[in-house]
């Protein structure tokens, strides 16, 4: 019996130790999560030099198709060319100093133009506007009038409030007299086009969709279904038009007329915004809710040129330093674990489906 109680006591001690250890881990994780929420919510803006990425891609191809001797000769010629270019730039800077009469004989090497690239992939709520505003704030702190901001914009539109705020964020750039270019590779319609029209220059891929300068709203109504099952819904308001169309109540013609009137007001504001930023557009012909692509959009002056963002940036990198600007939110430990677990599951599922596909069609 004494041996039984001794073993039982050891078991309880082990169990208690295990529970205390688990509790300590939970406390540590909870504390880390709270600290993360308090201290690590701001995140950071990360810049990536796209010139280097473009050069790495070119070098990868060169290494495959050129001999070692040709590569060596090309590098030597390129280094010589860059040295001569820097020499000419310094000489031009010295001449400018003498013309100003400031007595300067040596100036620092003149800075190249910079192109700051931001991506905006818009959803219905334009939820990425939070990151966009931080990216723009960061760029405006260092960009100069000889630089350029390029937005790679993809959006089919969404809420008036969300895209109105996003367009206002882009307007901050033009207010600082910094050239703003918007490139549309697939779609910039409705609220997406509202954002695009703020730019000094809009470029679009040949089959990108633009326009949809209109306003739409749709609301389901289940009043008849509720009535059939003898379910009453009371909607109490103060003010004749506090509610117009509803989901559960019975909609009236007067409510519909008021709702349409509100849509027309928003449409007029939308057209006024387009006219303010792109007065060259004939609103009578394009503010119909229709969309156009490529040459049709160019003829209607919805865009200023046809080009993909890749083509434009590759050409810009020949004369300018091109940087991708991205705001990255800091994640706490639990969020990072969640992302890692999700990625692992997705990877495993992809591999399984791939094997099943091959077994079904290639075995």
Image (cartoon, grey):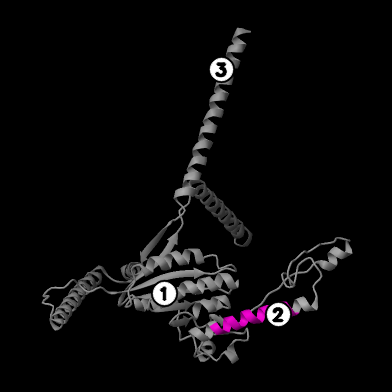
Whole-percent x, y for residue 103 in the image: 10, 77
- Label whose residue precedes the other's in the sequence (2 or 3): 3
| For residue 235, above or below residue 150 | above
Magenta stretch, overall SS: helix
Is any atom of residue 318 visible in this view? yes
Displayed quadrant of residue 176? bottom left
Residue 10: mark: 3
| For residue 60, above or below residue 21 | below
Q: Are marks 1 and 2 in contact (CB under 8 Å)?
A: no
Residue where numbered disc 1 is placed: 173
**Mark 1 residue crowding within 10 angstroms, few (<14) / some (14–19) / many (20+):** many
> Quarter of the image containing the C terminus?
bottom right
Magenta region: 257-272
Tell me if 141 is positioned left or right of 337 in this view: left
- Mark 2 or mark 3: which is in front? 2
Whole-percent x, y for residue 10 in the image: 56, 17
Residue 12 part of the magenta segment:
no
Residue 269 part of the magenta segment:
yes
Q: Secondary structure at mark 2?
A: helix
Q: Are marks 2 and 3 in contact (CB under 8 Å)?
A: no
Residue where numbered disc 2 is placed: 260
Q: Secondary structure at mark 1?
A: helix
Q: Residue 84 or 201: which is nearer the viewer?
A: 201
Whole-percent x, y for residue 68 in the image: 25, 68
**Mark 2 residue crowding within 10 angstroms, few (<14) / some (14–19) / many (20+):** some
Q: How far, Cα to Cα, is label 3 from label 1?
A: 70 Å
Residue at position x 76%, y 67% from top?
A: 247
Residue 205: mark: none
């Amino acid at each position: 019996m004494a041996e039984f109680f001794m073993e039982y006591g050891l078991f309880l001690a082990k169990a208690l130790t295990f529970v205390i250890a688990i509790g300590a881990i939970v406390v540590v994780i909870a504390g880390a999560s709270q600290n993360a929420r308090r201290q690590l919510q701001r995140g950071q803006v990360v810049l990536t030099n796209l010139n280097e990425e473009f050069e790495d891609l070119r070098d990868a191809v060169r290494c495959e198709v050129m001999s070692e001797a040709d590569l060596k000769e090309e590098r030597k010629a390129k280094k010589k060319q860059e040295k001569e270019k820097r020499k000419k730039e310094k000489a031009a800077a010295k001449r400018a100093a003498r013309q100003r009469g400031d007595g300067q004989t040596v100036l620092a090497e003149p800075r190249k133009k910079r192109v700051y690239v931001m991506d905006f992939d818009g959803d219905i709520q334009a939820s990425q506007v939070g990151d966009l505003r931080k990216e723009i704030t960061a760029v405006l702190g260092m960009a100069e009038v000889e630089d350029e901001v390029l937005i790679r914009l993809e959006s089919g539109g969404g809420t008036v409030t969300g895209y109105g705020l996003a367009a206002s964020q882009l307007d901050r750039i033009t207010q600082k007299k910094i050239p703003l270019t918007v490139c549309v590779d697939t779609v910039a319609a409705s609220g997406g086009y509202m954002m695009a029209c703020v730019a000094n220059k809009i470029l679009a891929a040949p089959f990108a969709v633009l326009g949809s300068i209109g306003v739409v709203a749709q609301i389901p109504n289940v009043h008849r279904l509720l009535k059939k099952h003898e379910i009453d819904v009371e909607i109490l308001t103060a003010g004749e038009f506090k509610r117009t169309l509803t989901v559960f109540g019975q909609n009236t013609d007067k409510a519909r007329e008021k709702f349409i009137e509100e849509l027309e007001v928003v449409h007029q504001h939308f057209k006024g915004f387009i006219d303010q930023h792109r007065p060259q557009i004939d609103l009578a012909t394009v503010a119909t809710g229709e969309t156009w692509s490529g040459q049709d959009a160019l003829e209607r002056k919805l865009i200023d040129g046809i080009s993909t963002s890749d083509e434009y940036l590759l050409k810009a990198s020949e004369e300018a330093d091109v940087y991708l600007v991205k705001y990255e939110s800091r994640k706490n430990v639990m969020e990072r674990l969640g992302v890692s677990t999700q990625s692992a599951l997705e990877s495993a599922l992809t591999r399984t489906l791939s094997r099943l596909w091959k077994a079904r069609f290639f075995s």
